[in-house]
Image (tube, rainbow, N blue to C red):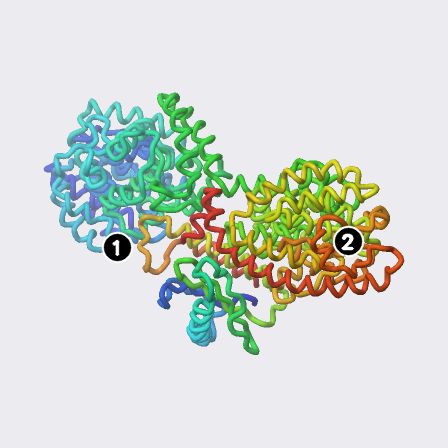
Amino acid sequence: MAVSTIILFLQNYPLYIRSVPTENELKFHYMVHTSLDVVDEKISAMGKALVDQRELYLGLLYPTEDYKVYGYVTNSKVKFVMVVDSSNTALRDNEIRSMFRKLHNSYTDVMCNPFYNPGDRIQSRAFDGMVTSMMIQVC
Amino acid sequence: IMELCGATRLGYFGRSQFYIALKLVAVAQSGFPLRVESINTVKDLPLPRFVASKNEQESRHATSYSSDSENQGSYSGVIPPPPGRGQVKKGSTSHDPVQPRASVDQQEPVSPVVSPQQSPPTSPHTWRKHNRHPSGGNSERPLAGPGPFWSPFGEAQSGSSAGDAVWSGHSPPPPQENWVSFADTPPTSTLLTMHPASVQDQTTVRTVASATTANEIRRQSSSYDDPWKITDEQRQYYVNQFKTIQPDLNGFIPGSAAKEFFTKSKLPILELSHIWELSDFDKDGALTLDEFCAAFHLVVARKNGYDLPEKLPESLMPKLIDLEDSADVGDQPGEVGYSGSPAEAPPSKSPSMPSLNQTWPELNQSSEQWETFSERSSSSQTLTQFDSNIAPADPDTAIVHPVPIRMTPSKIHMQEMELKRTGSDHTNPTSPLLVKTSDLSEENKINSSVKFASGNTVADGYSSSDSFTSDPEQIGNNVTRQRSHSGTSPENTAPPPPPPRPQPSHSRSSSLDMNRTFSVTTGQQQAGVVAQPPAVPPRPQPSQAPGPVVHRPVDADGLITHTSTSPQQIPEQPNFADFSQFEVFAASNVNEEQDDEAEKHPEVLPVEKASDPASSLRVAKTDSKIEEKTAASAPANVSKGTTPLAPPPKPVRRRLKSEDELRPEVDEHTQKTGVLAAVLASQPSIPRSVGKDKKAIQASIRRNKETNTVLARLNSELQQQLKSEPVSVELRLGGDPAVLMLV
């Protein structure tokens, strides 16, 4: 079980939450929430130029004994946080990046939908399908 | 009624019983005697009676949207459609509460009733069977009769399903024309809302005359047996509706307008959202005519109770657009789509429009035109394809060492070569190039996330190739390639040749590196690196680059090809400069170059890339590349006595350098001569003379290491700059990246 949870935040409000293991979900949610602070910290730490210089992929935010938390933020400050089980050592950084990339692409598609109001919870089936396939594949 | 429908006998109301009962109610309301046969006999009412309920159903399905009467007919056939149900798609929806409309299996209860055309093949049959029973074609249930009956029913149901809102709204059969009726011109504005109403009207409005026609048409369409197929009438209707929103048939309906329009259908937003996702095939936030028709068709189907498919049905797919392209286009900005979205999208679309206009009369033809359009609009695809084609070349070219194949001026060639090489050689001597290209590509990468992956490749290309013009391409390629390789391990393992490598790195590196690589015996990579560095520096200092390049060819013995390429490379250098859109980058590069030239000696590349895992990977790659290069060129270059460490100025170079550093032994043979004359100057100790190889090498190693660190730092900075650049790059590419970045 590699990817445990994926949560999308818009201004620290969750837009989309998906967890694979159904137990201890609250723990993952809590972890993700605390890691939001780390995300904000990284965003603000990008000194120099503004957003331009900032890389979207934030990398490992918070490693703990059992799991790792990865972060990704878009240019519009939508944060993607992913919790990965540490037991899966095969998950490399580039794979995480590619997962975030796919998430970003899918999120863009969701935004393209005129019926989607930014700030709503994401209920797109296509998005769900993509996330499910991604999480299953990782597992 | 209960007795008639069998409920009394069964003791409960099954679906069929319920439907029959509804039908009988309508019969009763319309004043007909209540008999079992009445269900079938009461056909004289508004809707013509169809004996062959099956056909009716099918045909109705086919044209359900278009003619409510059909639906009614089918309804009767399928299930004793509730008086209003058959008539109006709403009816089916109104039944939804009865049978959970929302449920996926709505198709069963609802679809049969609604219109066989869209229901799963099985359900219609079942229903039909059942329906024959009660009535051959109750569908005609007089609207007037059931109308009032249904109003309350509809209202009650509407409460349960949002979609039924309209139903209740127009429960009093509005004498509006069917929105899809053949007989009447479809209402313009209240299309969807009127739909249900029109369905009702159809039964009334559609007189026998129109009904028969409709029936005939339906029958014809039913023969297709494709529930999602759009009949010509429907299509015409949709087109007319499209015109009301967008007079230009070849134009797009922006997302906001479409949203307004479809909201009138009173479907829940979630369903509309899903419909949009299905029908916006190219994901551009706007609806073309085909997309609009597909969306409209889906809305109609939904209103009739058909469940929305998970995927767009074949018959609804915009045939014009290549599947590949549509996927790519998806990234284009959504709502904005029109206004300004990806630069490419609008332009690409517009060109096709004229062609479309020409073939407008023939929808099919226009769709073909659309194909071209979509192909153009899909930038991401193009990128990927482009990359794949070109990428291969780079690896080979980067290799340099084998033969100055890279010398070929054409980037493509280089790319191909590079790819070949990478394919064969994992470590890819071009890896250093790739690394460099990746650096550059990263910056230009549309998808920042891909940067790292592709960055390497781009960097390589960047560093190695003098021509920056190729860089953008390569970068794009790299980027796309990276995407494709995203899953794969970083550059090192990527079986596919490091895309980014592309010529840019090659062109430069080949000419320059070759010389150097030859001089370097041990470090192939170094050689490669060496080659690259020269390429990189040229950017900011075109003069320098050419110079060294020229030098190299001269120096390299076996680098005749290099020589030949060097001139080419020189011209590329200006490209190189062009490519470096980021002046800051260039400036910094220049500085770097000057400073690092001496240190950049590929042979001794500091391993500073440690901070950047990606870069480290790249470095590894470049090392391998360099090694290869150096190995090849070592013998040749040695004689040249090229400057041991002409650290290729460019950031890309830095990467190479880092790799070089990784292989200290490469130093010895650095023969980077001329390219970094300045650098060389800075490294006086650099042993040009063979005699002092050892000391010189060590000194050069030290210098290179220093240069490497500096370059590494510079590299990271430049990378960041590049990353920031993606926006501009994306816009340039006009594709998904732009959207992505903006989002």
Mark positioned earlier in the residue sequence (1 or 2):
1
Alpha-carbon span between mark 1 and mark 2: 97 Å
Query: Callout 1: helix, strand or loop?
Result: loop
Which residue of the protein is positioned furthest toward the left in this rendering? B31
Question: Between tags 1 and 2, which lies in front?
Answer: 2
Which residue of the protein is positioned furthest toward the right in this rendering? B691
Check the image and report above or below for A126 versus A138. Answer: above
Residue B272 drawn at (x, y percent): 31, 48
User: Of the residues shown, which amino acid type is indicated by label 2?
Assistant: Thr
Residue B363 drawn at (x, y percent): 38, 25
Left or right side of B370 for B609: right
State whether residue B620 appears in this view.
no
- The residue beneath circle 1 is B12
Q: Residues within 10 Å of mark 2 (few under 14, many from 20)?
A: many
Residue B239 drawn at (x, y percent): 30, 30
Q: Residue at x 87, y 60 (%)?
A: B692
- The residue beneath circle 2 is B643
State whether residue B293 appears in this view.
yes
Q: Relative to the observer, which residue lies in front, B94 or B464?
A: B464
Q: Relative to the observer, which residue lies in front, B146 or A27?
A: A27
Q: Residue at x 67, y 52 (%)?
A: B494
What chain does badge 1 belong to?
Answer: B
User: Of the residues shown, which amino acid type is indicated by label 1?
Assistant: Tyr
Check the image and report above or below for B67 versus B609. Answer: above
Q: Relative to the observer, which residue lies in front, B507 or B83?
A: B507
Q: Residue at x 63, y 40 (%)?
A: B572
Query: Callout 2: helix, strand or loop?
Result: loop
Q: Residues within 10 Å of mark 1 (few under 14, many from 20)?
A: few
